[in-house]
Image (cartoon, rainbow, N blue to C red):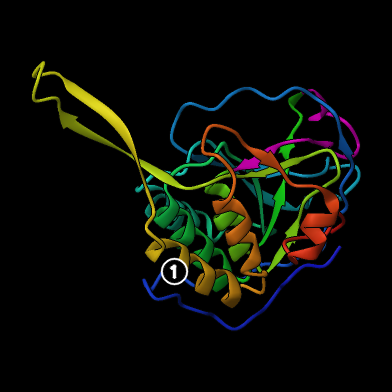
Amino acid sequence: MSQVHDCAGRKNRRSVTAVCFGLGILLILGFAPHPAHAQAMTFRLISVGDRVWCSGSCPVVIAAEGEITTGTPNAFLAFVESNVGTNNLHAIVFLDSPGGKVLASMEFGKILRELGAAAIVGRVDPAAANRRLSEFVAARCLSACVYALMGAKKRVIPPQSLVGIHRMFTYVDAADPDSSTVVRYRRYDNGEMAAVLERYTWAMGVSPELIAMAERISSDRIHIMSRAEIARFHLASSKF
């Protein structure tokens, strides 16, 4: 189990407190149903072992669960800053998200990269909390969540977890001149945002072809990426 006892401080562009983490961890992935997320993303610390197994100094990681909103990047920075002194905290983020805002997801991803964090599409199984080694179970990273995942220095998508993409859009409300009622419709990208995403994707070491593929998929459905697609686009590995 690698652990950073002493390292040079590093500040991101928002001057958040320096974060020193290690990246070694042993995972057991299993199946379990996961709840639908309708709330904004929240963060919490998770201990990944019991005191017997890790001699009272268990590794601690971050669980990020819920929808990525415009407030998520700042909320994550505040969470990290408030917990940076936590003993044995590792730069490992477990993601479980149905998606959210594209720009916020890219910002979240950039923060993960600046912190040198690893991201794993998985979540903790509460029933396993008292076992010798905590078990992590399948999760999802859908839609805009994929852009947050891209930012991580190391990305892991276990075989049981799902990663899905589709064409980006935003909801726009407009008044119907005939009925004076408000009508909601989808506004699609004219190519400008896709170009931004392609540059971001390239910078994060992922093939920009992933964006082109996503934009060909109807916004009415989610395309669950195959292991071959994940490998071809250099999105992630299946093991830590």
- Where does the image place residue 114, in percent across and percent down from the top left? 53, 73
User: Mark 1: which secondary structure?
Assistant: helix
Task: Evaluate whether residue 73 shows in this view.
Answer: no
Instruction: Please name whichever residue, 206 or 119, is drawn nearer the observer in this view of the structure.
Output: 206
- Splitting the image into 4 quarters, where does residue 117 fall? bottom right
- Where does the image place residue 187, in percent across and percent down from the top left? 33, 43
Judged left or right of residue 158, residue 179 is: left
Quadrant into which the C terminus falls = bottom right
Labels in figure, total = 1
Q: Residue at x 62, y 71 (%)?
A: 116
Give yes or no for residue 128 being in the magenta stretch.
yes
- Where does the image place residue 135, in percent across and percent down from the top left? 84, 36
Task: Evaluate whether residue 128 shows in this view.
Answer: yes
Instruction: Please name whichever residue, 117 or 176, is drawn nearer the observer in this view of the structure.
Output: 176
Dot 1 crowding, Cα within 10 Å, few <14, some 14–19, many 20+:
few
Q: Residue at x 44, y 52 (%)?
A: 102
Q: Is residue 88 above or below residue 175?
A: below
Which residue is labeled 1 in the image? 196
Q: Residue at x 72, y 51 (%)?
A: 120
Q: Is residue 220 above or below residue 189?
A: above
Which residue is most to the front? 178
State the extent of the magenta-drawn residues as a range: 127-142
Judged left or right of residue 96, residue 76 is: left
Judged left or right of residue 239, residue 216 is: left
- Where does the image place residue 185, in percent across and percent down from the top left? 31, 32
